[in-house]
Image (cartoon, grey):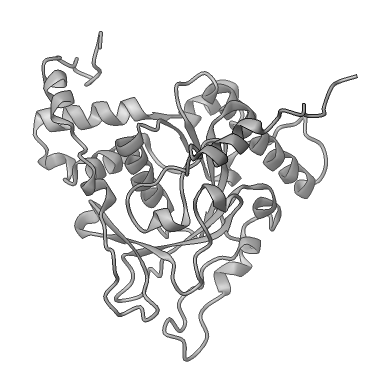
Amino acid sequence: MIDVIYKETAGLEHLNSIRNGSFKLGLGIGCDLDIHFRHKLKDFNVIAGHANVGKTLGILFYFLCLSSKHGIKHAIFSSENEIGSLKDDLISLYTGSPIKDLSVSDFEYAHYFVNEHFKFFNSDKFFYTQKRLMTFKDIIKVTNELDVNNLVIDPYNSLGKVEDIKGNTHEYDYQVMSELRMWCKNENKSLYLLAHGNTDALRKVFSKGHDFESHPMPLVSADIEGGGKFVNRCDNFIVLHRMTQHPELWMQTEWHITKIKNTKTGGKPTFKTNPVIFHAQKNLLNFEVYIRPNIYSDEPMNVVNPLREIDKINEIEKDIFNTITPNVSFEVEDF
């Protein structure tokens, strides 16, 4: 018989860490987002949002902050974005400058940093060689072989179906969510799964007389394609929203934190009217982060650009890098 009962000493390390003060919070990036959400190993995170609200760019900025501040490495499955576009966004955000304006040395260093901290799945090549879409099992199998701490799947509805999992769509999704959650715990990795809203959610707008009258409303957890099973099985649930046709707020991406499973390690849900704002700056090269005031037109407090606050290009590392000559593909050899 398989022993499935914990031993009496199980969990003692965790309890002692609370007693002796060594208990650690999740990783923050040095801004108001840390109050509501922190990156934690072994956590399964679901991010939902309407199409074209800036989900990919916003989370790339967040992951860059994690990489710059904590050295977190990511595996990115992004079937709806070209690899060149993703790298362009990452390098531009990292340097705060369009890549066409970068010096050769700054471009080489930024490209090297991105390659060191981000690995990208070539889903097109997989499709043409295997004659099928990548499944979540294909993705986690490859991820297990990579030196990364974090996996991103963007979006869920672009994955192929695992034929071994039987049942209807509802049962299938529940099984996938359960397996992804267990994978995070067993492999000591975090996962961010991106998903779209359902068709009915696209029709929901703020009511007449509201400050945001006629603009689309943020999703709630049940609005995600596939329903409540996602919020039920994940550790943390985040809704990203942007009013793309608002004349004043169209550059502000709202982060609504709707579920934090373990608040003891940091984080808590945001109030509906006070989401965390990622305010895009000129040419989408930076974000300022703050909590929206009760009156949206008021000046926010604690406005921080977390990536600019981090000493991104450590001068010692850069001096070492500049002694190395990349090849024509900007790949550093023997380093």
Eyeballing the image, is 52 above or below 179?
A: below
The answer to whether residue 101 is left or right of residue 191 is: left
The answer to whether residue 22 is left or right of residue 43 is: left
Eyeballing the image, is 316 above or below 271?
A: above
Q: Which of the two residues, 190 or 269, is positioned nearer the viewer here?
A: 269
Quadrant in which residue 94 is drawn? top left
Inspect this view and state whether residue 163 appears: yes
Give the residue drawn at x 59%, y 26%: 187
- Residue at the extreme right: 1
For the N terminus, give its image quadrant: top right
The answer to whether residue 177 is left or right of residue 66 is: right
- Residue at the extreme bottom: 209
Give the residue drawn at x 59%, y 35%: 16
Residue 270, horizontal then vertical, whole percent: 49, 65
Quadrant in which residue 15 is drawn? top right
Q: Which of the two residues, 276 or 81, is positioned nearer the viewer here?
A: 276
Q: Which of the two residues, 29 or 48, is positioned nearer the viewer here?
A: 29
Residue 175, horizontal then vertical, whole percent: 74, 40
For the C terminus, give its image quadrant: top left
Give the residue drawn at x 53%, y 45%: 155
Total labels: the figure holds: 0
Inspect this view and state whether residue 183 appears: no
Q: Which of the two residues, 126 or 171, is positioned nearer the viewer here?
A: 171
Eyeballing the image, is 293 above or below 46?
A: below
Residue 45, horizontal then vertical, whole percent: 56, 46
Eyeballing the image, is 97 above or below 328?
A: below
- Residue at the extreme top: 334
Residue 265, horizontal then vertical, whole percent: 52, 47
Give the residue drawn at x 50%, y 31%: 123
